[in-house]
Image (cartoon, helix red, strand yellow):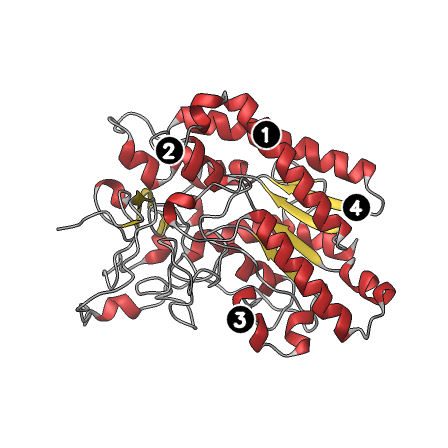
Amino acid sequence: MVKKLSINGKEGFILTILTMTSLLKVTNGNWFVRPAVPTPTVSSQPQVPCFFIFGDSLVDNGNNNNILTLARANYRPYGVDFPEGSSGRFSNGRTMVDVLAQLLGFRGYIPPYALAQNYQSNTILRGLNFASGAAGIRQETGNNLGAHFHFAQQVDHFRTTTETMRRIFRGDSARLGEYLRKCIYYSGMGSNDYLNNYFMPNMYPSSYQYTPKVYAALLLRDYSQQLNELYDLGARKVVVIGVGQIGCIPYELARMNDNKNKACNDKINKAIAMYNAGLIQMVKRFNSNLPDAKFIYVNTYESSKDLIANAATYGFTVIDRGCCGVGRNNGQFTCLPYQIPCPDRSKYLFWDAFHPTDHANQIYATKTYNSTSPSEVYPMNIQQLAMA
């Protein structure tokens, strides 16, 4: 029998069993078969000296592994197709930023900040991943899942990192500043502020206190302040990721009383659209008002619409259920420990109730890197940003 788990009586969207008295031994060979997903070509030298990542479970690569939280993915079948196994990534394989690191020419993946004390200086200089599952812009977002690092904390972690880097540069702040302005900074925040806050009325009062329009404005105000702090710490080339169609993920489809005739939850998607519209205006303001700022907006909402509308073109045959999970649409709970996932992950858009598969992440990353459509990337793509 499947039961919800909780921390301090708080239930959450991400199901994780922290301790088990017995583990299911899997002998099905299909579980360990890696889908045939092409690997991006890696250039001889990275196009930028470093890559810093801020975000939530869509790009977390292990920062939550050793804290008390339900938002963890360091167990099988997560990572079933990843060389490092169950590293803490909420996918069967790579996340979007893993693919972007490859496209940018990095020889290895950008490591998690949680293990920074174990790294050599050259590792820190090439970038760190500060992302944390359940994180949001608002500090209370995701508290139903337990501990995590919200965006302001992630920025603080970057501040600490710059102090370490300053020592590596022997106190030469000018040289450090020149170095940091060449790096790329990826920031994907906001999803949990809707999933694990606004559209969780039994846990958070925000939907009673604010209309969707007012709530989006509050998020944008706080996000703008935090990104300004990042700029003050030396960030110049910043990639701001929009929120995708949360109303179309398996979790939301499983919650709908009748999803036979509706592909998505329009109420949620309309609220997300308001926030995204504000993001692009924020990017424009930064580029106009901040000296040397080169912010770009990535319209993940539009890209996710494209993947759903043209699923067959991208090789997907299943777009409304997770490859692993529990219940309706495999979307009522996330993957259980040692659960056997679908045999061909490359055919699925979603890995679990919330997160894309490796194959989907590769498509999202490739669009972000080289799309020429202003409806997907504005005012330029990441490849152009690297050269700017």
Residue 135: x and y, percent?
Answer: 49, 48
Residue 132: x and y, percent?
Answer: 49, 54
Above or below, 99 against 186 in this view is below
Question: Is residue 383 toward the left or the right of residue 21 in the image?
Answer: right
Q: Which of 329 and 212 lies nearest the eye of the viewer?
A: 212
Residues at marks 4 and 1 touching, judged by CB atoms closer than 8 Å: no
Q: How busy is the neighbourhood of tag 1: few (under 14 within 10 Å), some, or many (20 plus)?
A: some
Asked which secondary structure carries label 4, the reply is loop
Quickly name the residue at label 4: 293
Disc 4 and disc 3: Cα gap in Å?
30 Å
Q: Is label 4 or label 1 in front?
A: 1
Residues at marks 1 and 3 touching, judged by CB atoms closer than 8 Å: no
Question: Is residue 189 toward the left or the right of residue 89 in the image?
Answer: right
Q: Which of the two labelled residues, at mark 1 and mark 3, occupies the earlier sequence position?
A: 3
Q: Which amino acid lies under the numbered mark 1 shown in the image of this protein?
A: Leu
Disc 1 and disc 3: Cα gap in Å?
33 Å
Q: Which of 209 and 334 lies nearest the eye of the viewer?
A: 209
Q: Which amino acid lies under the numbered mark 2 shown in the image of this protein?
A: Met
Q: How busy is the neighbourhood of tag 3: few (under 14 within 10 Å), some, or many (20 plus)?
A: few
Disc 3 and disc 2: Cα gap in Å?
32 Å
Quickly name the residue at label 1: 218
Q: Which of 67 and 331 lies nearest the eye of the viewer?
A: 67
Residue 281: x and y, percent?
Answer: 69, 31
Quickly name the residue at label 3: 115
Asked if residue 42 can be seen in this view, the reply is yes
Quickly name the residue at label 2: 200
Question: Is residue 87 toward the left or the right of residue 325 in the image?
Answer: right
Residues at marks 3 and 2 touching, judged by CB atoms closer than 8 Å: no
* Residue at image location 72% in from the left, 63% down from the top: 162
Q: Which of the two labelled residues, at mark 4 and mark 3, occupies the earlier sequence position?
A: 3
* Residue at image location 17% in from the left, 69% down from the top: 22
